[in-house]
């Protein structure tokens, strides 16, 4: 009887650990998707700042990209909110997501030195 109980407890721990690991991978994937969209938005904003205002075709194209990024971020946020609705108010979950998002944002080549330093600082 004790062996069966020990095996059941061990099995429960293994299942709990593996589901935690899967959840973490899923959160990493979601953070990465959001970071990629944020990075594209940063790129577009930088391009808008440096574009020649007299180049109306370029400005129109960049403004369209800016609008697309806005829509994409809204959709990603709504999906994230729906997927994690039970966890969003949990501080541990929020902290874990913030770390994953910071890690993912460090892959963005369009971050300013200040923004990069801020993301790195937030991971410590």
Image (cartoon, rainbow, N blue to C red):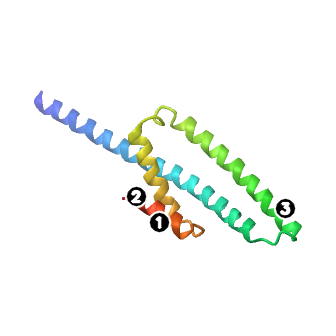
The disc label shown at residue 123, or none: 2
N-terminal label among 1 and 3: 3
Residue occupying image coordinates x 66% and y 44%: 74
Disc nearer the start of the sequence (2/1): 1
- Residue 31's label in the rendered image is none
The x, y position of residue 91, in whole percent, is 40, 39
Using the rendered view, name the quadrant where residue 109 is placed.
bottom right
Residue 15, percent from left and from top: 32, 39
Marks 3 and 2, Cα distance to the nearest angstrom?
37 Å
In the picture provided, is 77 more to the left or to the right than 2? right
Alpha-carbon span between mark 1 and mark 3: 32 Å
Q: Which mark is residue 117?
A: 1
55 or 27, nearer to the observer: 55
Evaluate if marks 1 and 3 touch, with contact meaning CB atoms under 8 Å apart.
no
In x, y percent, where is residue 35?
Answer: 56, 56
Tags 2 and 1 in contact by the CB under 8 Å rule? no
60 sits left or right of 76 in the view: right
What residue sits 42% from the left and 41% below the top?
93
Task: Judge the density around disc 1: few (<14), some (14-19), many (≥20) Cα neighbours within 10 Å.
Answer: few
Q: Estimate the spatial distance between the alpha carbons at disc 2 and disc 1, rounded to whole Å.
A: 10 Å
- Taking the image as shown, residue 92 lies to the left or right of residue 49, namely left
The mark lying in front, picked from 1 and 3, is 1
Q: Secondary structure at mark 3?
A: helix
Along the line of sight, the residue nearer the viewer: 111 or 54: 54
The quarter in which the C terminus is drawn is bottom left
Q: Which residue is mark 3?
A: 60
How many numbered marks appear?
3
> In the rendering, at what x and y percent does residue 102 appear?
47, 57
Marks 2 and 3: in contact by CB < 8 Å?
A: no
Q: Which tag, 3 or 2, sits closer to the chain's start?
A: 3
Q: Nearer the viewer, mark 2 or mark 1?
A: 1
Give the SS element for disc 1.
helix
């Amino acid at each position: 009887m004790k062996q069966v109980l020990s095996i059941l407890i061990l099995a429960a721990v293994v299942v709990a650990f593996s589901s935690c690991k899967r959840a973490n991978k899923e959160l990493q994937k979601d953070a990465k998707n959001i970071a990629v969209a944020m990075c594209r938005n940063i790129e577009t904003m930088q391009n808008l700042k440096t574009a020649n205002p007299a180049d109306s075709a370029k400005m129109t194209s960049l403004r369209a990209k800016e609008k697309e990024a806005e829509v994409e971020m809204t959709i990603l946020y709504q999906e994230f909110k729906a997927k994690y609705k039970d966890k969003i108010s949990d501080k541990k979950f929020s902290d874990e997501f913030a770390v994953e998002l910071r890690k993912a944002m460090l892959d963005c080549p369009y971050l300013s030195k200040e923004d990069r330093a801020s993301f790195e600082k937030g991971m410590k």
